[in-house]
Image (cartoon, rainbow, N blue to C red):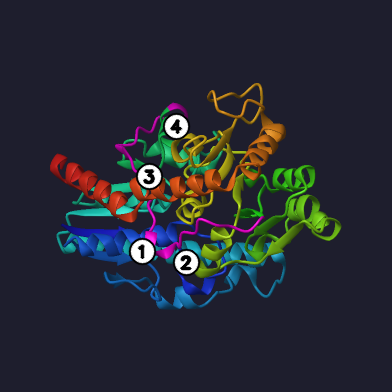
Amino acid sequence: MKIGILEPSLLMSNRYSNRVFAPKDLFLHLTDELIKKGNEVYVFTTSDIKTTAHLMSGNKELENQEFLSVRDGLKNSDVVNALTMIRNHYEYEVDLISRAFYYSNSNNFDILHSQSNVFTHYFVKFSKIPLIFTLHDPVFPQNSLECSILKMFASHNYIAISKKQAEMYKKIMNINPVAVIHHGIKLDYFNFSQDSENYISMLGRYIPEKGFEDGITISIKQNVQLKIASSPNYQKTDYYLRKIKPFLKKDSNISELSFLNSNQRNIFFMNSKIMLMPIKWEEPFGLVMIEAMACGTPVVAYARGSVPEVIKDGETGFIVNSSEEDKRGDWIVKKTGIEGLCEAVEKIYAMPKNQYIEMRKNCRKHVENNFTVEKMVNNYEKVYREIIDKQ
């Protein structure tokens, strides 16, 4: 197949390598594996990406320089600077999207796969080739611009990244994905260890949805070491300053690491006793769960979003209902909320060594069987062919 993969976000650029942008690795792994399988692949993204595909980038000036809008004059404020940066990013994205459509149509591609950039939808009616979009986000609020735009394009072809995400898009936005394809990772990027150190790990953006404050509470209640890692870009937020920073000084059990590169992240997970995910939202997938399990680290998480699809309760960690009012399964841990998370953490710390080692082996095997790049790409190829055949 002749395939175009479109990810126009400037966050793909190495300029933003200290920002959390989950689609980046998925985009690159998907592309390289499709080529290994004999497909001809063109990627439309930033110019500094390393890939074995044919690389098609956008306007270099827009990519490499942050312009000041004439309308802004020489005003200098955080708001103006932020809005100008957003405008630059949007201009780059629209330019690259238009190039992708022109090139793929002019060169008889079989399919164009977009990573669900909202602007891309406006170009679909001008395309002679089929398009498909991967949904990376949770369902947007009903009164949001994103929700309104996606409702306009509900008939387009979408791939969901979890069954829960697909169910919510169908129920709330009348979007019925053509398939559900779980994320996959390159196993050789993650080293397995049957042993660990004694700390709990949490990794992700410092936003309320990730539940870092619950992790801190559990560390204090259970008197166990907690290591948290995120990008420094989130350290000026009100959430970080109120809910996280005060405990870094006050409690010696709680420590913070900065942004981790792929090798550092591997070691961080591999040495962790447990990876904690007390999420407050319907997590569309949660890539960190399979990354941690690939290293052998069991995951303890609330039963929200994709969690019940990714964790095997009692085998690769524990699933906990977030409250008595929101029970989503009859899990091994019967307590809910913080008390349930504490019980799950206690269970793992109390395991005999041989039982804990067995759980770590189960984690790695579970990822090998269900969440590899090879399996993900096989599923994408199958959907591509189905969409092409319908054209």
State the CA–CA distance, disc 3 to disc 2: 25 Å
Which is closer to the viewer, label 3 or label 1? 3
Q: Amino acid at mark 3?
A: His
Q: Amino acid at mark 4?
A: Met
Which element is circle 1 on? helix
User: Label 2: few (<14), some or many (≥20) within 10 Å?
Assistant: many
Q: Position of residue 126 (x, y in %)?
A: 25, 51
Does the magenta-highlighted stretch encompass residue 185?
Answer: yes
311 or 358, nearer to the observer: 358
Q: Earlier in the sequence, mark 2 or mark 1?
A: 2
State the CA–CA distance, disc 4 to disc 3: 21 Å
Q: Which residues are magenta?
A: 171-198
Q: Position of residue 183 (x, y in %)?
A: 39, 49
Q: Earlier in the sequence, mark 3 or mark 1?
A: 1
Q: Earlier in the sequence, mark 1 or mark 4?
A: 1
Residue hosting label 1: 28
- Residue 286 visible? The answer is no
Q: Which mark is residue 182?
A: 3
Residue hosting label 4: 173
State the CA–CA distance, disc 2 to disc 1: 15 Å
The quarter of the rendered structure image containing the C terminus is top left
Residue hosting label 2: 10
Q: Position of residue 23 (x, y in %)?
A: 44, 57
State the CA–CA distance, disc 1 to disc 4: 29 Å
Please report the residue visible at 38 percent of the width from the left and 33 percent of the height from the top. Answer: 175
